Amino acid sequence: MAEAAARTLVTSVLFLDIVGYSKKSVADQMNVKQAFNDSLAKALTPIATADRVILDTGDGAAVTFLGNPDDALFSGLILQHSTELPIRMGINLGPVRIVRDLNGQTNILGDGINVGQRVMSFADPGQLLVSRSFYEVVSRLSDVYQGLFSHIGERKDKHVRAHEIYSVNLAADALPSFVEATWGSDWAGAVGLPTQASKDAAAAADGPALIFSTGSHFIVSGPSEISVLTALEELAKTGSKALSPISKVGNKWIATCDHPVAEGNGCKVEELGLMRIVTGPTREGVSEKLEELLQRGARLVHDLEQARGIWTAVCEVTSD
């Protein structure tokens, strides 16, 4: 940082303003500012402290990003979709100078941060705008950025300086996949966005339990306690009784129940017109019973499939 303080840098700056902040009571201002600080801290989580400088502006903040220029875009998108506070946001890419103020604290000066504030002033609550300089650099970093920006046109600030403005448009439901594809699953997970891995894990946790026959009893294993309980309830309908409570072993939930002695290892064949529906607690048992029907001339209609711990197959017969 000391080395950077001796020279001018070209950086991206994210300028933030809480709309209506000055009109609130002191107590409300404290609550709003705390919520704002929490949201900003979350949006900056994956970005190294050494790669950013945060200035508190009272009714908002200005964040200068010393690393990748699109870090500002990442934080702006996260803030835009993770807080209900009425925040106006503007991003600029331009020259800044890192200095020390009278208290020895790091401060940022220069046209880069001034233009960032001007761009932010053109935004509506909840809107994220960027300058032409930022757009021209970031839109060329990756093809996926091209569709994010819409050209708004020229706006003039109070000093009659003209600025070309672009808006950033990304639907909230598209944010998780966009962030994961662009910045990676680690960054997505760091700010609390669902990743494909977390979705797969959740889907697996909702999956059915598996039933294994050891001859004298069944072992029921599933990704969740409820999946094992559901399988045990289905087995109880065939006469099985629980032999052990449901317990967690590693990342699986397991229980055991007895194996009732019945033809086809607990399998049942139900008639529905010419259809024969074969159900049972194990794949082997249903497969064996299905094979008997096929050898007698039945035609397979629906192959073996497991649902809620029970295996099912369907065949069609022309005569008994």
Image (tube, helix red, strand yellow):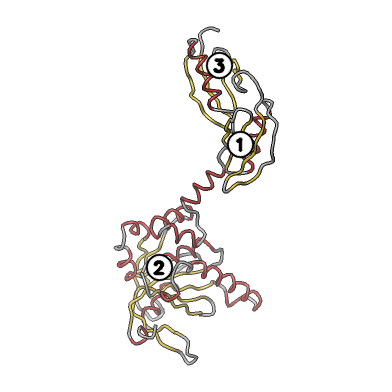
Residue 36 in the figure: left or right of residue 195: right
Residue 98: x percent and y percent? Answer: 39, 84
Q: Earlier in the sequence, mark 1 or mark 3?
A: 1
Q: Residue at x 63, y 39 (%)?
A: 228
Residue 317: x percent and y percent? Answer: 51, 11
Q: Is residue 191 above or below residue 232?
A: below
Q: Nearer the viewer, mark 3 or mark 2?
A: 3
Q: Is residue 248 above or below residue 30?
A: above
User: At numbered mark 2, what does the secondary structure look like: helix, strand or loop?
Assistant: helix
In which quadrant of the rendered view does residue 260 lie? top right
**Residue named by callout 1:** 220
Residue 87: x percent and y percent? Answer: 51, 68
Q: Is residue 110 above or below residue 141?
A: below
Residue 34 in the figure: left or right of residue 98: right
Decide which of 311, 13 is in the foreground and name it: 311
Q: Residue at x 37, y 78 (%)?
A: 112
Q: Residue at x 63, y 34 (%)?
A: 231
**Residue named by callout 2:** 71
Residue 29 in the figure: left or right of residue 124: right
Decide which of 319, 10 is in the foreground and name it: 319
For badge 2, the amino acid type reads Asp
Could you tell me how far apart the alpha carbons at marks 1 and 3 are, in whole angstroms? 26 Å
**Residue named by callout 3:** 276
Disc number at residue 19?
none
For badge 1, the amino acid type reads Val
User: At numbered mark 1, what does the secondary structure look like: helix, strand or loop?
Assistant: strand
For the N terminus, the image quarter is: bottom left
Please identify the residue farthest to the top as the structure is shown.
Answer: 319
